[in-house]
Amino acid sequence: MGGRAFTLAELAQATGAAARGDGQTLIRRCATLASAGRGDIAFLANPRYRAALADCRASAVIIAPDLAAGTNLPALVHANPYACFARVATLLDPTPAPLPGIHPTATVAADVQLGEGVSIGPQVVVAAGAVIGPHSVLHAHATVCHGVRIGARAILHPQSVIGSDGFGIAREDGRWIKIPQTGSVVLGDDVEVGAGTTIDRGALDDTVIGDGVKFDNQIQVGHNVRIGAHTALAGCVGIAGSAVIGAHCEIGGGAIILGHLEICDRVRVSAGTLVTKSIRTPGVYSGAYPFGPHREWLKGAAQVRHLDELVERIAALELRLKELEE
C-alpha cells in the first residue's frame, strides 16, 4: 500500500537537507541502494557501501556531502544522512496511523486518566490509577499496571509490561519473603518500549525513565532503576535494580548492568558487555570476563587489572638483561 508522494524539493524543505538535481523528482517510498527503482529514494550512510551507488536505480538518494560526488542521481545532501532518512521514511510511511480510542477488547480501569488522542489496542490492560499522556499508542497486549504514569507520545509495543512487581525478596530460615513493591513507574515524553520489554515498579521510590528513551525488544529493567533522557537500549539488555544510567547513553544488545551502579552521561556500552562497576567518565566501554568460582574470579580479575604494570615491569627487566649481557 502506497502513501503520499513528495517532490524532492518538498522533502528537502521538511528535513533541512539540500536538494541537488531536479527538485520536482517525485518520491513515493524508501528503498535500499540495491532494490530501489523508479519513485524510490535510497540512502547511503555507511561509506563502505558507496560502490553500490554505481548500479543504483533509485529516483534519488540521501547522501552526506563528502560522498555526494560519487553519484549523478538527484539527491538530498545532509550531514547526517541516516537521521535524514529517518525523517523521510516517517513522511513516506504508508502504515495507517493508530486511531484514537479504546479497542472493544481492551480492559481499562474506570479511574484511568487518558490524554487527548490516546490509542489503546486489542487486549491491552491499563490498571487502576494509571495516567497515559496525550497521543500515546498502546499496541496489542501491552500492560500498564496500577499507578503507572506515562508521558506524551509514548509507544508501547505488543507484550510490553510497565509496572510489574520488582524482584524484591528477603531470605529467612531458608525461605524467601516477598517485599511489597509500593513504588511505581514514571515514563517521560516520547518514550518507546519494544515488544516483550518489562519495566519493573519501584520497591519504595519510583522507577524513572527520562524523556525520549528508546527501548528495543526483550529488555528487563529492574526496580528503582533511573535512566536519563534520550538514552537508547538495544535488545536483551538486562539492568538490575537501583542502577542509574545517564542521559544520551547507548547500551548495546545483550549488555548486563549490575544493580546499584551509576553510569554517567554519554557512555556507550558495547554489545554483550558485563558492567560490574560504576562508569564515571564518558566514552566507549567493552568486554566481559569468564565466570567461575567466585573467589577464583575475584583473584583473576585483580590480576588482570595489573597486566599493564606487569608488562611494563617485564619490558624493563628485558632491557636491563640486555644491558647486562652487552
Image (cartoon, rainbow, N blue to C red):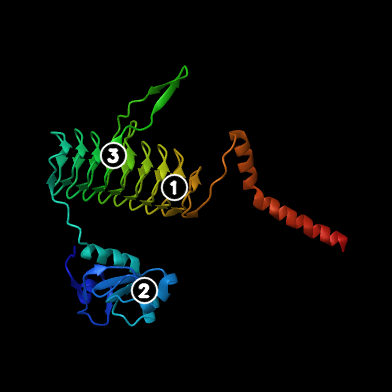
Dots 1, 2 in contact, CB < 8 A: no
Q: What element does badge 1 sit on?
A: loop
Q: Earlier in the sequence, mark 1 or mark 2?
A: 2
Q: Position of residue 219 (x, y in %)?
A: 37, 44
- Residue 249: percent from the left, percent from the top? 40, 53
**To which residue does mark 2 refer?**
64
| Furthest residue in direction top, as rendered | 173
Residue with the mark numbered 3: 162
Q: Residues within 10 Å of mark 1 (few under 14, many from 20)?
A: some
- Identify the secondary structure beneath mark 3: strand
Amino acid at circle 3: Ile
What is the number of the mark on residue 168? none
Q: Residues within 10 Å of mark 2 (few under 14, many from 20)?
A: many
Image quarter hosting the C terminus = bottom right
The Cα–Cα distance between marks 3 and 2, rounded to whole angstroms, is: 39 Å
Task: Label 2, secondary structure: give it.
Answer: loop
C-alpha span from label 3 to label 1: 20 Å
